[in-house]
Image (cartoon, rainbow, N blue to C red):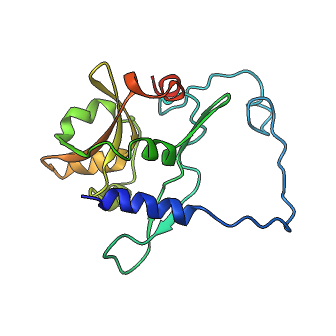
Amino acid sequence: MGGFNDLYKQLLEDFTAPTDTKRPVKVRPRGKYGTINPQLNEPHSTKSISGFKGQPGGKQHTLKFLLPGDKEDITKGITTRWQDGDIDISLIDVLKYLEKEPVINIKPEKLKHALIKVKRDPARVQAADLNYPLVVTKVNGKFKKILDGQHRLVKAITNKEPTVKIKVLDINSAPDDYKEMFS
């Protein structure tokens, strides 16, 4: 079942753009806390509404790519980032780290407690593709956070799907930056 890993590798290739050294680079001023917003440039809590340490607004950009067997582009947010101080982890970093981890099928209700409590666009929920695994953290044997796949989980619960695919990021054995960011 190399489909997920093949798609992941294709995404990395598509995401790498050639560097144009002749073009001037526009540098935006950034303050001590990584923003030009003066209100946020003072010491402040890095806890966001979603509960992830330092997440500055969730999905920042959108990447369009062709899914195997599809005839048109499907929009997928793949550039989620978590930032806190010197730590900067992208969803692509996490997927690369989990590349060799198996995809597990689990009952959606076992992850319901990890959903972020926000209103979701029903159309976006129903458009979520359940073929892609959720990325879920596990601490001391318990599922804690959904790093990627909130809409997919809501769709699976709403549609009474028997299982949902997940990849598990075990925080106990993860790199120190992951432990600090996602614990």
Identified at 79% across, 29% down, the residue is 32
Q: Position of residue 73 (x, y in %)?
A: 44, 74
Name the quadrant of the C terminus.
top left
Between 150 and 177, the one nearer to me in the picture: 177
Vertically, is 76 above or below 92?
below
For this orientation, the residue located farthest to the bottom is: 71
| Quadrant position of residue 25 | bottom right
Identified at 58% across, 56% down, the residue is 61
For this orientation, the residue located farthest to the top is: 140
Name the quadrant of the N terminus.
bottom left
Q: Report whether 101 appears left or right of 28.
A: left
Q: Position of residue 2 (x, y in %)?
A: 29, 59
Q: Position of residue 29 (x, y in %)?
A: 84, 43
For this orientation, the residue located farthest to the left is: 162
Between 24 and 36, the one nearer to me in the picture: 24
Vertically, is 43 above or below 151?
above
Between 61 and 5, the one nearer to me in the picture: 5
Q: Position of residue 13 (x, y in %)?
A: 53, 64
Q: Report whether 107 appears left or right of 51.
A: left
Between 141 and 63, the one nearer to me in the picture: 141
Report the number of numbered marks: 0
Identified at 45% across, 46% down, the residue is 96
| Quadrant position of residue 106 | top left
Vertically, is 16 above or below 137?
below
